[in-house]
Image (cartoon, grey):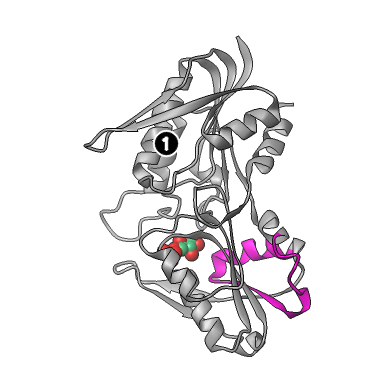
Amino acid sequence: MNDLIVCGDELGGELAKKLKVQHIPVITRIFPDGEVQPRLEREARAKKAILLLRKRADENINSYIIRYYLLAKKLRSLANEVIGVMPYLPYARQDTIFRDGEPLSSGYIAELIEKCVDTFITINMHEHRKRIHELFSIPSFNLSAFPLLAREFTDFDKNNSLVIAPDEEAEKYVSEFIQVFESDHIVMKKTRDVRTGKIKLRLDEKSKLKNRDVIIVDDIVSSGGTIVKVAEECLRSGAKSVSMAFVHGLLVENAIKKLMLINPKKIVSTNTVENRFERVNVVPLISKFVKKRLK
Ligand code: R5P
């Protein structure tokens, strides 16, 4: 029996190398009707097993959750303890009931995950109204990649840069970012129509933007609607350039095209989900945490 194994995709392979343990790759087949059939390349028994899987660029978010769930459940039959690492936790934005009849989806997804893992680790979960410990009843940990994203901007002039948060929720991301990249920052105000999903932004300190190299930071870029709106507002207010730094590049619909139309100076994302702008590798962050936890 192995003490520890890591199952999962290429990020899992990297983590296994760092932890100097066996890696078991995952193979996935999708049936024509959409059913997911994941498989561990081989079976191995272990005291502890880590499952690290990220969403593929062309993978439906719901298929990803099912794939994760099925494999974690399988691992339960092979290991005494399963440590689930989901670099991006879907459904975390649905953390309250906005309108009558809606399910509390973030809580229900957490319940599903808890059925098959003993410990849960994620990166920059959308902790708006609920902290990770309020969502899960098992030991759960939310790591942050913003300090790593900030390191990608060391070639920028700190004195002429301005870091912007699209809304108050992103203020904590900005504060982590500027601990590494110490520049001026501002926070915008965002409201979203719960029925149509349309957003409205308010920027109170427009004069601060003149001739500045703006870096917009956010946790998720999905349709690109929010970040593009912020970028347009910055350019209208006289910013010299706009750059974007985000953790989870979901980049659905024609988000990439929308982002490129802004002509950003730099776009940096992590590899929590497979995407075109991944520059920051989160495996060292996960490995450091796991090593500490397993000590
Ligand atoms: C919302 O509160 C998040 O922090 C992101 O700003 C949002 O999910 C981005 O979505 P989209 O790219 O579709 O505007």
Position of the C terminus by quadrant: top right
Q: Residues within 10 Å of mark 1 (few under 14, many from 20)?
A: some
Residue 3, percent from left and from top: 65, 15
The quadrant of the picture occupied by the N terminus is top right
Is 246 situated above or below 294?
below
In the rendered view, would you say 43 is above or below 30?
above
> Label 1 amino acid?
Glu
Identified at 56% across, 21% down, the residue is 81
Residue found farthest to the left: 33
Q: Nearest the camera: 126 or 40?
A: 40
Q: Nearer the viewer, residue 101 or 179?
A: 179
Label 1 beta carbon within 8 A of ligand 1: no
Q: Is residue 169 highlighted in magenta?
A: yes
Q: Is residue 265 magenta?
A: no
- Can residue 184 be seen in the rendering of this structure? yes
Q: Position of residue 84 (x, y in %)?
A: 53, 32
For residue 101, which quarter of the picture? bottom left
At a point 50% along the width and 28% down the height, the residue shown is 117
The magenta-colored residue range is 152-178
Question: Residue at image x 46%, y 76%?
Answer: 229
Q: Is residue 249 above or below residue 274?
A: below
* Disc 1: which residue: 111
Q: Secondary structure at mark 1?
A: helix
